[in-house]
Image (tube, grey):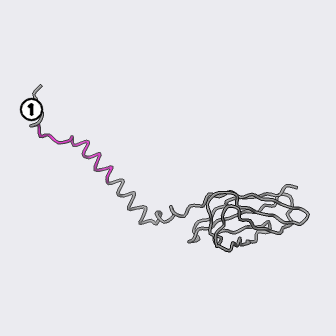
Amino acid sequence: MQLKHLFTEDRAVSPVIGVILMVAITVILAAVIGTFVLGLGDQVSETAPQASFSFDYNSTSDNLVITHESGESIENSSVSVINPAGASNNWVEADGKISAGDSTTLTISPSDGDSVRIVWTSESGSTSSTLQKWTYNA
């Protein structure tokens, strides 16, 4: 083996590898710039919170107690409780956040198949998601 010849070799990386690397870098840069130009970067942070709710309906008093069981705390200004008539009720907490253990009571007279939805809306109002749904079965 000629060790001296190995260290004096001055050939660069093959042109094919160089072109592939340049194309990959260009595609990655275009994707990153395009994301911010189109405003898609802002929507990434507007994902719905992960939370679990329980529902306890008392038919004698027509009260539906909704309890935040577990998951992320949620700003109460971003949560609406949609009743079977389609009206929106606000969930109000003194500290401004709905946390595990917090509950609210909704007075309803549901028919079979009626549902109540807990809907989260992003701060900008561009995104909304149903966090949990309860359906009345007679």
- Across and down, in percent, residue 52 comes to 68, 57
Write down the quadrant of residue 94 in the picture. bottom right
Q: Quadrant of the C terminus?
A: bottom right
The quadrant where residue 116 appears: bottom right
Residue type for callout 1: His
Q: Secondary structure at mark 1?
A: helix
Q: Quadrant of residue 5?
A: top left
Q: For mark 1, what is the residue?
A: 5
Residue 17 magenta = yes
The span shown in magenta is 9-25
Question: Measured from the top left, where is residue 135 in percent x and y?
Answer: 79, 57
Q: Residues within 10 Å of mark 1 (few under 14, many from 20)?
A: few
Which residue is located at x 10 percent, y 27 percent? 2
The residue nearer to you, when weighing 57 against 24, is 57
Position of residue 75 in the picture relative to residue 33 (left or right): right
With 16 as the anchor, is 67 left or right in this view?
A: right
Residue 133 position in % (x across, y down):
73, 58
For residue 21, side relative to residue 46 (left or right): left
